[in-house]
Image (tube, rainbow, N blue to C red):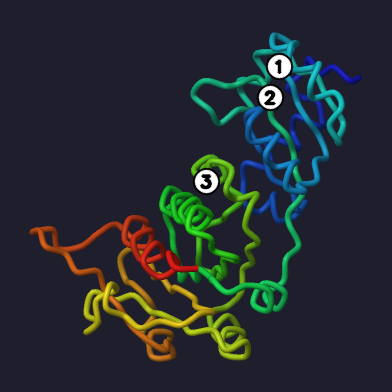
Amino acid sequence: MKTVSSSGNPLIKHITSLKQKKYRYEFNQYIIEGAKSIREATKYGAKLDYILIDKEQLELMHEFQEYPGDVVLVENNIFKKLSEEKNPQGIMAVARFYSHSLEDIAENGKAFLVLDRIQDPGNMGTLIRSADAFGVDGILLSSGCCDVYSPKVVRATMGSIFHIPFVYEDMDSIMNAMSKNDVFVIGTSPHAAEVIKDADIRLPAAVVLGNESGGIDDNILLKCDGKVKIDMKGRAESLNVAVAGSIIMYEIFKTM
C-alpha cells in the first residue's frame, strides 16, 4: 500500500488537476468524496482508479482496502488541500467517466429529462436528484450545460448521479432521438396555455427544462409536442428551475 507525504507527488498533482473541467475531460476521470458516496458509486458500477484515505482516518482502511482501485494513504494536511468539503470525511476516490450513448438511453426508457443550457451546479444537482426520485430513466444534457462531473454537482446530487444514465449531446440530436423513439416531448414555459395538472401526456415522455435566465431555446420549444406551465396561486412571478422542474417531473411521472 502506497503512502504519500508530499504535495509534489505526481498523483497528488494529477488529482488536483481534476478540479478543473479541461483536465477531467482530458483524463476522463472525476472525484468522488465521502464514504457513503463511494459505497453508492461502486454499488452501481462506477469504476474507481484510486481511493485516497487520510492517515488520521485509518479506521476507513478496514472497509475500503477491499474495494477496486489503488488505495493510497495521504497525510492529513495534503488531504485537506485536496478536499472540496468544508469538513472532509477523510476519504475520496478518482472514478472514470461513464460511457452512455444517446441512442442507448433513448431506446431503453419511458421517462426522460432534457436539460437545455442549465448553468448552476446547485440546480443541476437538485434536478438530477429529483429525476432519480421520480423515476426518470435517462438525462439528456445539451452541450451548453454545466459539467455534471464537477465536484459541486456530484456533491449536490447526493448519490443520484450514480443511479441514472446521462449523456451530453447537441439539442437537435436529442430532439431527433426523442422523435425517432416516439417520445412525447413536453416543453416548459411560463407562457404556455396549458397548466401541468390538466395536461394530457402519454408515455414515453420527456420533460425539457431551459436555461435559468433564458428558458428553453425558441427553436427547441417549437419542436416540443406540448407546452405546459405550473399554475401558481401566490404572488411570486416565477420559480427556480430546479423547483419548477421537480414539480413538473412529479406531476408527469407520478402515474408510471
Q: Are marks 1 and 3 in contact (CB under 8 Å)?
A: no
Please name which of the two marks, 1 or 3, marks the residue nearer to the observer. 3
Q: Residue at x 67, y 75 (%)?
A: 102
Say left or right for 133 vs 39. left
The residue indicated by pointer 3 is 157
* Residue 80: % across, % down: 61, 20
State the image coordinates of residue 178 (x, y, percent, origin top left): 57, 84
Give the x, y percent position of residue 200.
35, 83
Task: Tell me how far mark 1 sits from mark 3, CA to CA.
Answer: 24 Å
Mark number displayed over residue 54: 1
Measure how far apart labels 2 and 3 are at the Cα level: 18 Å
Q: Are marks 1 and 2 in contact (CB under 8 Å)?
A: yes
Q: Nearer the viewer, mark 2 or mark 3?
A: 3
Mark 2 or mark 1, which is nearer the start of the sequence? 1
* Residue 223 percent location from the top left of the image: 44, 90
> Which residue is tagged 2?
91
Tell me which residue sits at (73%, 54%) in the image: 97
Identify the image quadrant of residue 230.
bottom left
Query: How many residues crowd around disc 2 within 10 Å: few (fewer than 14), some, or many (20 or more)?
Result: many
Q: Residues within 10 Å of mark 3 (few under 14, many from 20)?
A: many
Specify the amino acid type for callout 3: Thr
- Give the quadrant of the N terminus: top right
Residue 92 in the figure: left or right of residue 129: right
Three-letter code for the amino acid on which mark 2 is drawn: Ile
Under circle 2, the secondary element is strand
